[in-house]
Image (cartoon, rainbow, N blue to C red):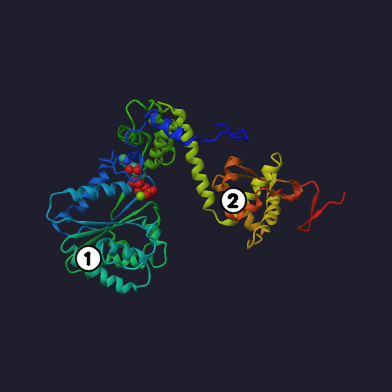
């Protein structure tokens, strides 16, 4: 439908009608969700075996050892523990172990962890989100474990355990949890810690380390051929038959293998490629869709990274963006960024001036993150300076900056040194008289 300002209005009814009539690409899209637990986990046999061996005695009511699982992100740690816990629950034994799963990134304080364990077991009587002293909750938790779980085993899975250890009171609560068995009469507990920070053990209290066992289970990164096997199995469930061109899975696997063999990334690529094909009403998913998916995922990642940066770092990036936008040919040096930062920070209430040193630190951080490049150049008698360039599409940076509320007023600010009628003297901007 043509609107009076000559632009087309989106016809949502027609869109849905066409969508329903359009080609079906997915069979079970949910199978590509991160929460989906597959029926089998290729290339994780040895980890499944180790965990099964450690946890089997729970079926007889004996106390399994506590242990840690390590590996880079996307190596199947969470999926494997969830898989084993399901299998254990399906066994035909008199004793049914309990599993309490805690993601320490979400349930993030020692108090909330105790409350979460209590509330999950109790279901009825709840511990309030704040307020009770720790020793009271602890006493109530011990009573509940003994009365509700009885002579069974309670597995406490602490996923992303490194986040807990880094928090105030984290080591203490972990110590208390590893010693639960000393204070329980009937029930027994076992801790399973999961982490993708390989070095976090160095921050652990040695008493906790000894309770968590010397042994730990390592999840190595997948190589491209292992990722291919994982994707082939998942694609069979997720996609209709003969929808994926044969190059699609090897390409997703190769791209994710470059990214330290991250299965999550491989699955995200496979899913996004299908969604792009679907959006374009294509009946086949091709390498082109995978390439586009890779580009979109990378952009999402960069956007998230920028949104999570400290405000001053965002302001430095905004300064570089504004110079590049108003004068694409201009060669940006650190001094320019210092000037523009000090101009635009004055337009936002409550933002401090930064020293040249701090600005230089932020420039290094942005460069390490791959958002800009900063090349040190010798200027002869004038010493050395950095030549700075944006390494990410301007449009992308502009879009993220627009989404930062505080920056609304600076988006169209033209730096003083690029305004023909302005001159800067001793950090003050004056209007030129001639
Ligand atoms: N061997 C495998 N077979 C099938 N799917 C797998 C396998 N390994 C991982 N996956 C899938 O990859 C995704 C990421 O796995 P998972 O969440 O277990 O990674 P993780 O090691 O816990 O990562 P993080 O450290 O980031 O939490 C999930 O969707 C999971 O189902
Ligand atoms: Mg995980």
Specify whether residue 339 is in view: yes
How many angstroms separate mark 2 from mark 1 (CA)? 51 Å
Name, please, the residue furthest toward the right: 434
Q: Quadrant of residue 132?
A: bottom left
Relative vertical location of residue 205 with respect to residue 230 in this rendering, above or below: below
Relative vertical location of residue 383 with respect to residue 291 in this rendering, above or below: below
Q: Identify the secondary structure beneath mark 1.
A: helix
**Residue at 26% across, 71% down:** 140
Residue 38: x and y, percent? 28, 41
**Residue at 37% across, 45% down:** 74
Residue 12: x and y, percent? 47, 36
> How many C-alpha atoms fall within 10 Å of the one at disc 2: few (<14), some, or many (≥20)?
some
Q: Would residue 34 appear left or right of 405 to someone viewing this image?
A: left
The verdict on label 1 being within 8 Å of ligand 2 is: no
Specify whether residue 220 is in view: no
Residue 253: x and y, percent? 39, 34
Pick the front one: 3 or 151 = 3
* Disc sitting over residue 364 in the figure: 2
> How many C-alpha atoms fall within 10 Å of the one at disc 1: few (<14), some, or many (≥20)?
many
* Disc sitting over residue 32 in the figure: none
* Disc sitting over residue 145 in the figure: 1
Q: Would residue 405 appear left or right of 43 to someone viewing this image?
A: right
**Which is more N-terminal, label 1 or label 2?**
1
Q: Quadrant of residue 145?
A: bottom left
The verdict on label 2 being within 8 Å of ligand 1 is: no
Q: Would residue 383 appear left or right of 265 to someone viewing this image?
A: right
């Amino acid at each position: 439908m043509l609107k009076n300002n000559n632009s087309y209005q989106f016809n949502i009814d027609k869109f849905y009608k066409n969508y329903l009539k359009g080609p079906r690409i997915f069979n079970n899209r949910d199978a590509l969700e991160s929460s989906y637990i597959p029926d089998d986990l290729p290339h994780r046999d040895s980890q499944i075996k180790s965990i099964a061996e450690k946890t089997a005695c729970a079926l007889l009511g004996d106390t399994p050892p506590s242990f840690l699982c390590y590996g880079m992100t996307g190596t199947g740690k969470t999926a494997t523990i969830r898989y084993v816990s399901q299998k254990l629950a399906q066994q035909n034994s008199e004793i049914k172990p309990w599993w309490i799963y805690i993601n320490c990134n979400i349930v993030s304080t020692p108090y909330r962890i105790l409350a979460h364990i209590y509330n999950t077991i109790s279901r009825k009587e709840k511990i309030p989100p704040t307020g009770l002293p720790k020793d009271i909750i602890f006493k109530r938790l011990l009573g509940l474990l003994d009365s509700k779980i009885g002579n069974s085993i309670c597995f406490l899975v602490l996923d992303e355990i490194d986040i807990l250890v880094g928090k105030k009171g984290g080591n203490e609560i972990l110590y208390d949890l590893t010693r639960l068995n000393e204070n329980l009469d009937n029930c027994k507990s076992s801790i399973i810690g999961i982490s993708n920070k390989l070095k976090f053990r160095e921050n652990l209290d040695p008493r906790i380390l000894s309770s968590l066992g010397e042994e730990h289970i390592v999840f190595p990164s997948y190589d491209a051929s292992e990722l291919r096997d994982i994707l082939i199995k998942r694609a069979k469930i997720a996609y209709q038959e003969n929808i994926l061109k044969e190059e699609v899975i090897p390409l997703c696997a190769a791209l994710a293998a470059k990214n330290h063999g991250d299965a999550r990334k491989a699955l995200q690529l496979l899913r996004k490629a299908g969604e792009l094909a679907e959006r374009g009403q294509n009946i086949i998913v091709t390498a082109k869709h995978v390439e586009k998916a890779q580009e979109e995922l990378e952009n999402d990642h960069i956007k998230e990274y920028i949104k999570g940066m400290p405000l001053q770092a965002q302001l430095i990036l905004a300064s570089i963006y504004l110079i590049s936008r108003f004068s694409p040919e201009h060669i940006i040096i650190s001094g320019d960024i210092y000037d523009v930062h000090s101009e635009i920070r004055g337009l936002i209430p409550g933002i401090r001036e930064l020293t040249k040193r701090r600005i230089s630190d932020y420039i290094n951080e942005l460069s390490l993150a791959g958002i800009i490049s900063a090349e040190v150049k010798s200027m002869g008698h004038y010493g050395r300076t950095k030549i700075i360039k944006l390494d990410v599409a301007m449009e992308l940076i502009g879009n993220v900056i627009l989404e930062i509320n505080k920056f609304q007023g600076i988006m169209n600010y033209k730096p003083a040194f690029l305004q023909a009628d302005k001159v800067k003297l001793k950090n003050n901007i004056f209007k030129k008289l001639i």
